[in-house]
Each structure stands twice: as C-alpha cells, then as structure tokens.
C-alpha cells in the first residue's frame, strides 16, 4: 500500500474497527439515509460501509482518488479531489450533513476548526484523532486546567463523546502514537456569537497568567458586569460556562 508521508497518511486496515466507527453514526441507528461527507477515504475501508447514505468523498491524494473511482464507479462524480480545509459545503449544496473520517494527524486541530466554521451545516462528526487531542476535546475528567481554546469552542457548540481507543497496530504504516475515535454532535439552539467567543477565549489564553480584567482590558463590556468577581480570576479558574457568560456581555471588541 502506497502512502504519502507529507499528507500524514496512516491507513486503517482493520475492518472491525471500520464497522464500529460507521455503526456509531446516528443514521445507522435510525435506519435513515442522510448526507455524509467522508474525509480522506484512502482505499475505501470506511466507504464500503457508508454506501447506503447520500455519500460524498473528499480525497486529496490523486492516487487514491483514482483507486476509489475504480472501486466505486457509481460514486465517481461524488469523489472530490480537494483539500477538505478548502471545501465550502455550499458549493455542493451540503447544508445538513455528517462529517466522518480517519482524519490525517497533521490536520487534526484544523478539522475541528473546520467543524466550528461550518457548524450550522454539520450535525455530527465521528472521526479518528490522536488520543492526546481526543482526550483534550472530550475532557472526560472535566478539569478546568485541561481546557484549551479548541476544547472550549467545541464544547460550547457540540456535545462530545469518547467512543474507544485504537491501537497503532491496526494502521499501515503504524503511527507512533495511539488513536481514539470520538463523536461530536451539534447542540440545539445555541445563540452565542462565535466570533466574539473565539476572540474572548483566544485573548484570555494568550495572557493566561493575567487576571481576566487585565487580559481583556481592551474589550468593552457592560459596566455593571465589570464588577463581577469573575474578572479577578485567571484562565485556569474559568469554566466553559464562564467564557460563554463573558462573551454575552461584550459590547465592542
């Protein structure tokens, strides 16, 4: 099996793991077809279990684009040779879809930011991530000190669930790290301005040793809110709810 190191390719070769990933999808449990966007399909180990969905495939490596088109000729027009990070779902009339894939390790965080960027369109995401990133995003222990910018943003708009850990022995070539499969489901009726929240969180984390009243001193808040004791705290003392509450009180930034 050929692979491109520069694309971070580590192909899943265990069919049972592939089935587990696909079977965790919402539509599989409800027996309803839905739009599914598979990222980095490679030789199609997940693809063959997704054929009952309204499937689109994104593959950057032209070698595997050709292999997939030979394996699944009826999907030929839906196998798209593009970088997922450059794909605008609207160009393919995708406004309600699931994102799935054995995501390349090299773009793991970028995939999650892509999910946030198109959160209005993506209802669910199931994917393979480095275990370190998966642990941080799910934050199973719910420790404030383990929160990151990405964790806060994802968990504000999505529910996260740790599904299972995957040994490096089920990949070719074998990665040096363990992997995990996580499930991310969009929350309903979250009316928090993403641009403001992202600004608040990134600014606070960029000066994490300072109290919030100092790190956010260039942002204009409601005057009454400025007396809130929350402004005397540092980043590691804040919860996800604290950040969302702060963002709601922004007047100008």
Image (cartoon, rainbow, N blue to C red):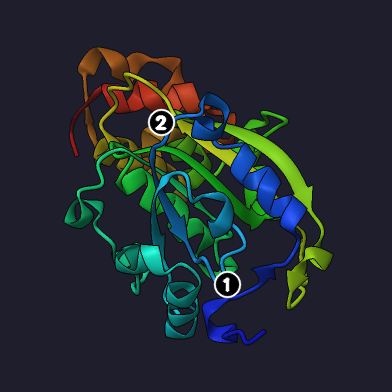
How far apart in space, not on screen, are marks 1 and 2 (Cα)?
32 Å
Q: Position of residue 237 (x, y in %)?
A: 58, 29
**Within the image, what quadrant is residue 175 found in?**
bottom right
Residue that label 1 marks: 43
Q: Quadrant of the N terminus?
A: bottom right
Q: Residues within 10 Å of mark 2 (few under 14, many from 20)?
A: many
In percent of width and height, residue 75 lies at: 38, 63
Q: Is residue 80 above or below residue 224?
A: below
Q: Secondary structure at mark 2?
A: helix
Q: Is residue 123 left or right of residue 180?
A: left
What residue is drawn where x is 38% and y is 32%? 213
Residue 195, picture quadrant: top left
Q: Quadrant of the C terminus?
A: top left
Residue name at image x 74 percent, y 69 percent: 171
- What residue is rendered at 48% in x and 46% in y? 150
Residue 148 placement (x, y as % from top left): 54, 44
Q: Let me know if residue 37 appears in the view.
A: yes
Q: If you read the primary sequence from the N terminus, does the residue marked by circle 1 or circle 2 appear first? A: 1
Q: What residue does disc 2 label?
A: 157
């Amino acid at each position: 099996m050929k692979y491109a190191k520069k694309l971070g390719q580590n192909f899943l070769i265990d069919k049972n793991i592939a089935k587990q990933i696909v079977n965790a999808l919402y539509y599989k449990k409800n027996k309803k077809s839905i739009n599914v966007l598979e990222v980095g399909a490679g030789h199609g180990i997940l693809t063959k279990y997704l054929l009952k969905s309204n499937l689109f495939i994104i593959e950057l490596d032209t070698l595997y684009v050709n292999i997939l088109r030979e394996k699944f000729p009826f999907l030929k027009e839906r196998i798209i040779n593009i970088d997922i990070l450059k794909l605008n779902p609207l160009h393919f009339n995708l406004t309600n879809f699931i994102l799935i894939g054995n995501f390349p390790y090299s773009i793991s965080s970028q995939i999650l930011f892509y999910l946030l960027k198109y959160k209005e369109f993506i209802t669910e995401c199931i994917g393979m991530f480095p275990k370190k990133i998966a642990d941080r995003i799910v934050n199973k222990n719910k420790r404030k000190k383990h929160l990151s910018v990405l964790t806060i943003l994802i968990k504000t708009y999505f529910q996260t669930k740790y599904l299972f850990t995957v040994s490096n022995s089920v990949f070719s070539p074998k990665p040096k790290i363990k992997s995990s499969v996580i499930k991310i489901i969009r929350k309903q009726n979250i009316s928090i301005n993403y641009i403001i929240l992202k600004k608040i969180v990134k600014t606070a984390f960029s000066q994490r040793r300072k109290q919030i009243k100092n790190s956010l001193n260039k942002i204009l808040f409601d005057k009454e809110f400025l007396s809130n004791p929350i402004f005397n705290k540092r980043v590691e003392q804040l919860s996800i709810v604290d950040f969302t509450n702060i963002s709601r009180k922004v007047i100008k930034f």
